[in-house]
Image (spheres, rainbow, N blue to C red):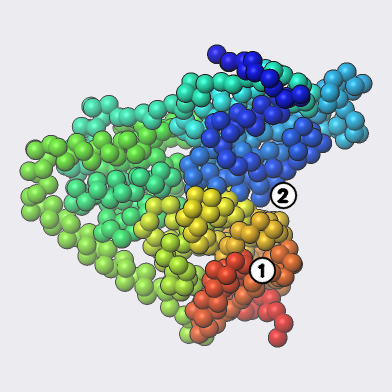
Amino acid sequence: MATVNVTEGPEKYTAAEAFFEALWDAGVTHCFCNFGSDHPGMLEAMMVAMSMTDGFARVTGKPQVVIVHVDVGTQALGCAVHNASVGRVPLLIFAGLSPFTIEGELDGSRNEYIQWLQDVHNQRAIVEQYCRYTGEVRSGLHIKQMINRALSFATSDPKGPVYLCAAREVLDAKIQPYSIDQKHWSSVEPTALSLGAVELIANSLIHAREPLIVTGYSGRDTRVPDELVKLVTAVPGLRVFDAGVTNHVSWLGCGYAGNDSIRTADVILVLDCDVPWIPTRCKPRADACVIHVDVDPLKHNMPIFYINAQHRYQANEFVAVTQIKDYIASNDEIQSVITSPLYAMRLLGLQEANANRMIRIADEAKPSGEGFFDTPYLMDQLRKAVPKNTIFVVEAITNTQSVAEQLRLTTPGSWFNSGGGGLGWSGGAALGVKMASDFTGSRQFVCQVVGDGSYMFSFPASVYWIAQRYKFPILTIVLNNNGWNAPRNSLLYTRPEASALKVSREELNISFSPTPDYAGIAAAAGRGEVGCFRSFKADDLAETLRTAVQCVLEGHSAVFEAQLDGPDGKHMGKQ
């Protein structure tokens, strides 16, 4: 129940002030804002603001707030709200509504012509299907309760964005100062597996010939990777696909389409993953036992989703993995089984396969015969050039697998990617990650790795103006492969015999040639204080990368245009 503060309050205490008080009391530390005529009681591009909020929340695990302008600001969030929803990022979107009075009946009544044009029937519907909760604040008398209810949804599994809106008359209304008890507004506790489920999963993994874990979200809770390592170490022969335990023999790499291990495994544990495989390209064998553990196993936001799982459980990933690991460690019968020679042989097999995988990855990281380089060699050199504690914000699209394999990161929280399909996420997200890193005191180096098309979608002019204005230096690596590879790949997967695959990218209109001056765009937005670097030669790549890194360490953002496979059709700068 709300408690009215009976002490002398300010001369004019409004719902807008109560709004910010509620955010502070709930632990929100930052608001990322694009103000408009609906926000005078509160007083950078919206995609960037939302992506910054996204990146900040991913690092801290704490919900943050983005404030936008009525219907048009809500629409401008577009791809960013999709990414936050798919990425399960806890954040609150707040938007104003056009004033609902027009003759000065209340404070905040309409006084600009645009307020008629921005008055829509259902503003919440613009983003409703991407949010865990939407609501309208209709009175300042319960604004704190509305905010905390929304945040409870945002921070409970499956986490995600929430949306609130309010008209200017509501925000400008004078109210009596009041407070609420924050201990009554917590998120829902993470769910656990039943004892029967723990026993079934543990025994299935132990007695399988080719057990496999397929996971996609394991790094969102930075405690999970270490628990996964302990689990796969406790079960010799247990492998993991698409997870960040890259220095462990059980690691099989990552990818979107699937892995050969999925086709042969007799027991598969799908652990908190939206798309464990694509059936038209890779699927389990008919007699495989598939167990699905997820905070949202039915995927409520997906109209069509199913996998052929015999067992489904709704549970928090960290809790579930810990339960399974502890059950195996405490069960004497299981311990006697896994110490047999069969399991030692399985471990030797994994070690040999892992060694061959590392050889293959190393062989790919070599320059071409012409002295050019591709993504594997670039990432191998980048890994050597950046500080050890670097956080990577990755939007490499068709190059994602090569980036992951060459960087081989082992520290939880050192890799962030969108997870969604809204391109342009990584520019703002990298700023949010850097901001959060500085705010928490770790002050880590942040490196954005982005495809050339996604770079253009990221509103680089806004990104590098913000970076320079607010002193958030980041290193951006633009993978310039001179066009869109994703459309061609999509056609290849659908119609491999298509005649369009035999023509050039220029003929398909998916080429960027002649390419923009990617670094120059950033330099202009950053008033000439952004470092500009480019290279197509393997011989000078390492030194150029070191120079770019030093530029960032000295407090200036830097953009490195990596001209993959040579300079043909690409901007060369001043000669």
Residue 206 seen in the current view? yes
x 48%, y 81%: residue? 368
Q: Position of residue 146 (x, y in %)?
A: 61, 23
| Dot 2 alpha-carbon crowd within 10 angstroms: few under 14, some 14 to 19, many 20 or more | some
Residue 242 position (above or below residue 181): below
**Mark 1: which amino acid?**
Val
Residue on which the image places disc 1: 530
Quadrant of residue 207 in the image? Answer: top left
Nearer to me, 525 or 337: 525
Q: Amino acid at mark 2?
A: Ala
SS for dot 2 = loop
Q: Nearer the viewer, residue 2 or 264?
A: 2
Q: Residue visible at 54% across and 31% down?
A: 26
Q: Where on the picture, by quarter, is residue 529?
A: bottom right
Q: Is residue 156 left or right of residue 468?
A: left
Residue visible at 34% across and 70% down?
360
Q: Position of residue 58 (x, y in %)?
A: 50, 46
Q: Which mark is residue 45?
A: 2
Q: Is residue 98 above or below residue 47?
A: above
Is residue 465 shown left or right of residue 119?
Answer: left
Residue at x 26% of width, y 29% of height: 197
Q: CA distance from mark 1 to mark 2?
A: 19 Å
| Marked residue nearer the N-terminal end (1 or 2) | 2
